[in-house]
Image (cartoon, helix red, strand yellow):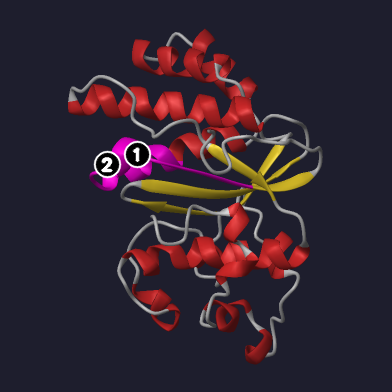
């Protein structure tokens, strides 16, 4: 029997919740560098490739062999910036969440490439062998605007839940997420927060995204699109 959300249906121009966790629920991020590397891979895949600059490095006599090798690898690496947009994310010690908008059907290619690339980095760094992630990644279609908004909150509150804190204390979480982009504390142009924030008020605190985060989460709204609520 297939595990929850492992059977996927892909639709053009649609929102998806992508997630996966470590095999046997083991940690996939052991230090700050691991989080940074995973995040850097997301950025590389989801920002337009500057082919002109990369080719200039390759042709320059002043470029070091290391710089040329890196540029060549980036030129060869598939880029998804025109087909996939990241709305929000959260990285936890043993799993990750991504909320994306797919323009073309590329989620399978994107997620497999991301997972394989990160697993190679992780295994090389920690001198281990074998699979890093539990089963195949999960990707589930978001079917309503209400579900989309509550999924963004579920993802942003996930780090708080991991620390056994109530939603009202979401500011205390130290795990990486896009919540600071949503609150205006940080600007990352390839995180497309406006798909969510356009539903909220910028002038009325009672109808702000910040206030929405502090509300109690109704798990029924996102159960079918998420990791089992009590099994993270």
Q: Which of the numbered marks, if any, corresponds to residue 26?
A: 2
| CA distance separating discs 2 and 1 | 5 Å
Report which quarter residue 187 is drawn in. Answer: bottom right
Q: State which region is magenta.
A: 17-39
Magenta highlight on residue 29: yes
Q: Is residue 75 visible?
A: yes
Residue 146 point in image, percent of width and height? 73, 68
Residue 209 point in image, percent of width and height? 62, 77
**Residue at image x 37%, y 37%?**
37
Q: Considering the numbered disc 1 on the image, is that residue within a helix, a strand or a loop?
A: loop
Magenta highlight on residue 48: no
**In this view of the protein, which residue sits in the foreground, 127 or 134?**
134
**Residue at image x 61%, y 25%?**
109
**In this view of the protein, which residue sits in the foreground, 44 or 226?**
226
Classed neighbour count for the residue bearing mark 2: other residues with Cα under 10 Å, few (<14), some (14–19), many (≥20): some
Image quadrant holding the C terminus, namely bottom left
Q: Residue furthest right?
A: 12
């Amino acid at each position: 029997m297939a595990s929850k959300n492992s059977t996927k249906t892909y639709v053009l121009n649609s929102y998806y919740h992508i997630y996966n966790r470590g095999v046997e629920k083991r940690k996939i991020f052991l230090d700050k560098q691991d989080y940074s590397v995973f995040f850097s891979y997301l950025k590389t895949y989801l920002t337009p490739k500057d082919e002109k600059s990369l080719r200039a490095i390759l042709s320059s006599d002043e470029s070091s062999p290391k710089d040329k090798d890196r540029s060549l690898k980036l030129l060869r690496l598939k880029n998804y910036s025109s087909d996939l947009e990241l709305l929000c994310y959260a990285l936890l010690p043993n799993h990750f969440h991504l909320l994306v908008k797919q323009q073309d059907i590329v989620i399978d290619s994107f997620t497999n490439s991301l997972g394989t690339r990160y697993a190679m980095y992780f295994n090389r760094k920690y001198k281990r062998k074998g699979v890093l992630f539990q089963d195949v990644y999960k990707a589930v279609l978001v079917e309503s605007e209400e579900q989309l908004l509550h999924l963004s909150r579920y993802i942003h509150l996930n780090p708080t839940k991991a620390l056994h804190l109530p939603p009202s204390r979401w500011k205390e979480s130290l795990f990486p997420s896009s919540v600071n982009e949503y609150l205006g504390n940080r600007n990352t142009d390839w995180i497309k927060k406006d798909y969510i924030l356009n539903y909220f008020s910028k002038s009325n605190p009672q109808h702000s995204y910040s206030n929405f985060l502090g509300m109690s989460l109704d798990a029924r709204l996102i159960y079918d699109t998420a990791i089992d609520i009590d099994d993270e």
